[in-house]
Amino acid sequence: MPHPKTLLLFNYDWDELGAKRLKDNWPSLESGFDLFSFPSNARLAWFDTERFVAKAAVFARLTGAKAVTSNHEQFGALCAALLAEKMGWPGTPVKAILACQHKLYARQILQQVAPEANPTFSRLDAAYGGPVPNHIQYPQFVKPVKAAFSVLSRVVNNQQELHEHTRFGAWELWVIKHLVEPFERIARKRLPEAGTAHSMLLEAPVTGRQYNLDGYVWKGQVRALGVVDEVMYPDTDAFMRFEYPSQLRTTVQARAADVARRFLNAVGFDHGLFNMEFFHDEARDKITVIEFNPRMASQFSDLYLRVDGIDLHEIAFALAHGIDPATLNRAPTTAGSAASFVYRSFDPKAQVAFPTTAQKNSFRESFPDALFFEYIKDSKELQRDFKWLRSYRYGIVHLGGDNTQHLRQRCEQASAMLGWTAPYLDAPPDRAPETHTTKPELFLSKPVSTST
């Protein structure tokens, strides 16, 4: 017997695949627009969170939806919390969403409950495009208080670099303000103590390997699901692959889960999926939190499903309907190790060769379990990627294997069939080295995807 309908907000890419996979037992409806695609993303010009939620409530009543969920960082998670509150449905508290997404306020709370996992931080005392203060000690990692573009997250080594990094053209300023202002209007009403989100945050740069802790909270109980290893292209801040299960020691994973528990309890996050990005410096055995995301890390749902039989998207549906995810049945496992492989170019002059139809057909026949995404972009989009991200992500492949060695063998075979270099580089790509904290890329153009 199917469950009642669930309204999915800003549902595309990984979440679209998850909803399709579960449609027989968890029927759903969609509302929202795609920030990756024109003309859909033109709605950004007049988007208002409260107006969107009011319309979504009417739509839910007319269509018989009984729950709402979203894994969309920019607008969806907050809108889902507001709609659940309005309709009396299970959901993450609005203030907890705001506390996680306001990066400066989240740092302040983390400093109170887990200072050992927090870097030194401060608000950049300058408006967008304003003069850079003289008293700053470098290097610093700079990022938005409310993340809009990963392009705005990087290490700066001196005042000139910070000055150049915070100069924006008229179009860039328009986009930034329209992405942040919907959050700002709600935060002013519901979390005024956090201060404005229209600013930048400075943090002490951190070293170590990067990881992602995934979990959910049910009736105030924080339940960790696992840790994904986030492997970078050597000497860069660009993700090369995401591997599950983690190679991180279980004792360190438990410490990371404890940090998450303390923070989530402090901000009143008592219901919903979350993920915590963090560094672990092996030499000092130190954990440092990068940020908390009050939603599922959708890209990793497929990895957990392959290895553990746990479907993060089904957990999201269950939580939306007030069902304890611990009561869900697990799917049969298909792999001992799984990864999301990211293919990149670091040379703006290089021409990426995309696989032909024949190559893709052979790939699908040889790897029926694979997920395949290709990111085909025009010259202007490529120019933007290299300016903002210093690389071009042109493809993603998901695969499973019996173990890490078998997984690498499959990846190398699959990559060869696609005509791409397998993302297992032991040496840095041809580019200047950088060492700094990182953040998942947001607001890239929409990929062409194939699932088999």
Image: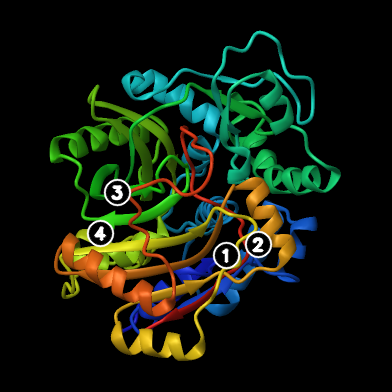
User: Which residue is labeled 1 in the image?
Assistant: 10
| Front in this rendered view, residue 163 or 359 | 359
Q: Is mark 4 on a helix, strand or loop?
A: loop
Disc 3, SS: strand
Mark 4 → mark 3, Cα distance in angstroms: 27 Å
According to the picture, the residue beneath numbered tag 2 turns out to be 35
- Label 2, label 1: how many angstroms apart (C-alpha)? 9 Å
First along the sequence among labels 2 and 3? 2
| Distance from Cα at disc 4 to Cα at disc 1 | 24 Å
Q: Against 52, is 157 above or below?
A: above
Marks 2 & 1, CB-CB < 8 Å contact: yes
Marks 3 & 1, CB-CB < 8 Å contact: no
Mark 1 is on which residue type?
Answer: Phe
Q: Is residue 310 visible?
A: no
Residue on which the image places disc 4: 324
Disc 2 residue type (three-letter) = Leu
- x, y percent for residue 178: 75, 48
Quadrant occupied by the N terminus: bottom left
Coordinates of residue 52 in the picture (x, y in percent): 68, 60
Which residue is rendered at x = 32% and y = 19% of the image? 116
Mark 2 or mark 1: whose residue is earlier in sequence: 1
Q: Which of marks 2 and 3 is in front?
A: 3
Under mark 3, the amino acid is Asp
Q: Residue at x 25, y 59 (%)?
A: 324
